[in-house]
Amino acid sequence: MELKKYLKLMDIKKTGFCKKIGITVMTLNHIINGRPPNLKTALAIEIATDGNVRCRELIPQEIQKSIAKHVTNDSSSNEETNKKKTKRKKIKEE
């Protein structure tokens, strides 16, 4: 659901919503008018709206892909680090 529609449907004032998620009214207006929020703000909006306005609706797909790529790279990097630690431990035990 669009954020603007959600606020109107739930009869929520912009000022109160902004205080709840920690942004300014100007930032909220930018988001409503199509400027993507940062990830922290997008998550805060999703939580504050009980999932009725989703992060993926607020953040463009190319940014979502970039985030997914970094998350995937981080997890595979952690697996490699863990494998190296295990090898070192085995060598020390011998």
Image (cartoon, grey):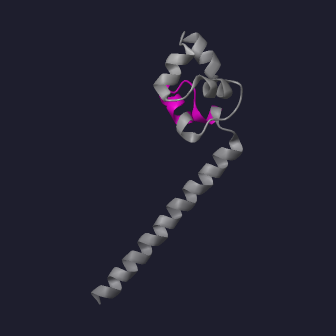
Examine the rendered structure and indicate whether residue 63 appears above or below residue 27. Answer: below
Examine the rendered structure and indicate whether residue 20 appears above or below residue 80. Answer: above
Q: Nearest the camera: 71 or 39?
A: 39
Image x and y of residue 90, in percent: 33, 83
**Is residue 43 highlighted in magenta?**
yes
Residue 49 in view: no
**Is residue 45 highlighted in magenta?**
yes
The segment highlighted magenta reads 42-57
Examine the rendered structure and indicate whether residue 10 appears above or below residue 52. Answer: above
Examine the rendered structure and indicate whether residue 80 appears above or below residue 63. Answer: below
- Which residue, as the protein is rendered here, is positioned at the far bottom? 94
Task: Report the predominant secondary structure element of the magenta stretch.
Answer: helix
Q: Would you identify the image quadrant in which residue 60 lies? A: top right
The quadrant the N terminus occupies is top right
Q: Nearest the camera: 55 or 39?
A: 39
Q: Nearest the camera: 18 or 86?
A: 18
Image x and y of residue 2, in percent: 64, 22
**Residue at 56% of width from left, 34% of height from top?**
42
**Residue at 67% of width from left, 35% of height from top?**
36
Q: Would you identify the image quadrant in which residue 25 lies? A: top right
